[in-house]
Amino acid sequence: MKQINTRSCVDSGGTADASGPVSGLATFIAIGVIVSAITWAVLVFSHARNDDAARRPVIRTAMNADELGGGTEVSWDTIEVKQFHDYANKQGWEDTELIVTRFVGADDTIKYIAGQIAGVSPDVIIASRDQISFFDAHNLIEPLDPYLEKWKDYRDGKFDASMLDACRGREGKILGIPVYQNSPNVYAIRADWLETLGLEAPETLEEAREVWRAFTFKDPDGNGKHDTCGYGVTMETRRGGHLYSLRPFMGAVRVTWYRIDDAGRYVPTFNTPEAAFVLDFIKSCVKEGLFGADVMVRPPGSVTRRFFAEDDLGMAGPFFVDWFANLANRYGMEDKVAFVPRLWKDTAARAANHYGTFTYLTRMRCLMRASPNKELAWRYLEYFFSQEWLSKYVSRRGLPFVRGRYLGQFGVFRSETPWRMVRHDVFPEVPLSEDVVAMVRPLEQYLQPTPMMTQWSQVSVELAETFVDYYLDRYDSAAEALEVAEVRFNRIVHGSGTGR
Amino acid sequence: MVRAPVVESIHAGSLLLTRQRKIILFGLVSAVVFIGAVVCPAWWILRRHAQAHAAFNAATAAYMMYDVEKARQMFSKMARDYDDLSIGALADLKAAFLIYDEQGDLNEAERLFKRFLKDHPETLMHLPQTPDNFEYHGELQLVAWYFLGRIAEDHGREEEAYRWFTSITDAGSRNPANYIVSEARAIVARRQRVGGHP
């Protein structure tokens, strides 16, 4: 080929000799210019797109792993991103992007902090009371009051003020918004065992002890074995689980664990003769074996699971009626169990209407102070707590993943029916039984608020250890155990042995 | 007569006659037969099951995204496309359930559940093929009986409803954690307690 071309150039008489290299160079330059132009255009275009993407408002949310549902291939992230996108379009926020991050593992708090240190902190988090109080103590959380006050729905009184009051931190600011509040706690009892033994449901602690004795020693399930016990208590101390078991009884005598004084200090409130009465009551039941002979050595486990699945407990608590129906249904126990709304300390307390109880809020959604654009991040909360979304959340068979279960179980599965929603204008589609509501509603007058406390997870472990030690005769009296517990409380919270 | 080179070679014993070549040829033929007779059908069956599950999950996803009508259509389609698989029959029940539960069309739901029983006269089991605790596992006819009981109840035909529910409790299930049976037991017990049924 080369030879032919050379010959051709020579034969053309020199003209081609002169124009050939020139035109070749021009072509080369032209092609170079075109290629360069295209390359630059592509680079500039893609840079512009990236720049545009970088400028696009992004809200990052993070949730604990256990917020996620299971049993379906549709991830919660996908669903929430889609729902937010639909809502944002209606609000004219089309360009706002939502990114949902899951923290998988035990201690989500550390991961939130690590995210902040790494500069990739989420704007919005879903957090427990313990987490929120920790963030509050370290000034990491953004109070929501100014955002709420700008929101018409809030100004119009659509939100439950008392529920939001329970979300206030050290300085009285609202730190997060829960979805709903559980019912006041109640007990559950084996109605079929009561019937078998010809007993009535107890109303006082002493009556309860009599019933527990029968459940423990009179073979209520009729199998000829000594394999039942009266009441389910956990003695687990590693996470302070025993205090959860103890709380309904302390509530009955109106004992709380702590309060915040006028100076903003946490003051222990449990070192009282009433609390000593409860510890003595529990200890005597332990000694009688009414919680099971192995109560002290039983591995940590759910009393709820034993009550429903293992079928060996006569009574258990605390329960919240909003999820109890679902559990009873799931285990086929609906017709075997009944509620005991309260156990008075004694007949005198009943006559004096002296009682206390407690409840819980769902996890709260909060704004992080480190968020680079908090006004933007607020849009997520406005979306999540809008009437539209919350209505879907509770009225249309519950959360999307709960809906998945509902469909999976042909509607026989019942999702948790919220007791009291954070918004007044949102109602669950499947209401609680009117009988149950009529029985439990009067308990609301006895609710005792519990302020958030950063060190509660540590304190609860120490208190649980002290009380279990008392049941094991390591203290001479309940009063001595309570004294020690108070010292331990103050050492953690105030760094000293003296609290008051 | 001039023979073709291959035939000549065979006659000369140069092809297929050595032991080593026989083994190779036998191995090749066996592999082809095995792939054709076992692997391909198994692969086809597995692929079909995977497609059916993907279609089922997509329909469930549509329901979870609040798109009920789309979900119903997808369940109906997969019931037709996979009518030889238990998951196809399950999808048929889901479509009927959505007519009952979401649309509240009792007559249409009743027709669909009865058609299901007619289409599946023999006991049809749906067994777990994925680790899913929230999907129904057990005899599929029980689901149709249960909803025919519910529909009869909704229509005020109490005796008929009771018969459907007792049919379920009498039949029981090979799945000890069958919640349809558990629910039917609770209904029967409640009716015996308050409704005067024996």
Image (tube, coloured by chain):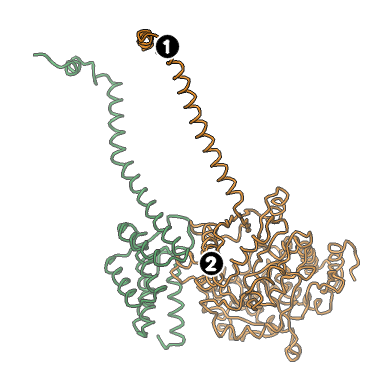
Q: Residue at x 59, y 55 (%)?
A: A99
Whole-angstrom CA distance, mark 1 to mark 2, is 81 Å
For disc 2, the marked residue is A399
Q: Give coordinates of residue A357: x percent, y percent.
A: 71, 79
Q: Give coordinates of residue A127: x percent, y percent.
A: 67, 62
Q: Which mark is residue A158?
A: none
Question: Looking at the image, is A292 positioned above or below residue B32?
Answer: below
Tell me the shade of chain B. Answer: green
Tag 1 subunit: A
Q: In front: B143, or B61?
A: B61
Q: Give coordinates of residue A317: x percent, y percent.
A: 65, 74
Question: Looking at the image, is A500 positioned above or below residue A37?
Answer: below
For disc 1, the marked residue is A17
On the picture, is A236 further left or further right than B138?
Answer: right
Tell me the shade of chain A. Answer: orange
Quadrant of the rendered structure where residue B184 is?
bottom left
On the picture, is B37 further left or further right than A425?
Answer: left
Quadrant of the rendered structure where residue B2 is?
top left
Furthest residue in direction bottom, as rendered: A351
- The reply to whether callout 1 and callout 2 are in contact (CB within 8 Å) is no
Can residue A317 be seen here? The reply is no
Label 2 sits on a secondary structure element that is loop
Amino acid type assigned to the residue bearing label 1 in the image: Asp
Quadrant assignment for the C terminus of chain A: bottom right
On the picture, is A187 further left or further right than A430?
Answer: right
Can residue B164 be seen here? The reply is yes
Q: In front: A192, or A497?
A: A497
Label 1 sits on a secondary structure element that is helix
Quadrant assignment for the N terminus of chain A: top left
Q: Earlier in the sequence, mark 1 or mark 2?
A: 1
Label 1 vs label 2, nearer the camera: 1
Q: Residue at x 65, y 63 (%)?
A: A378
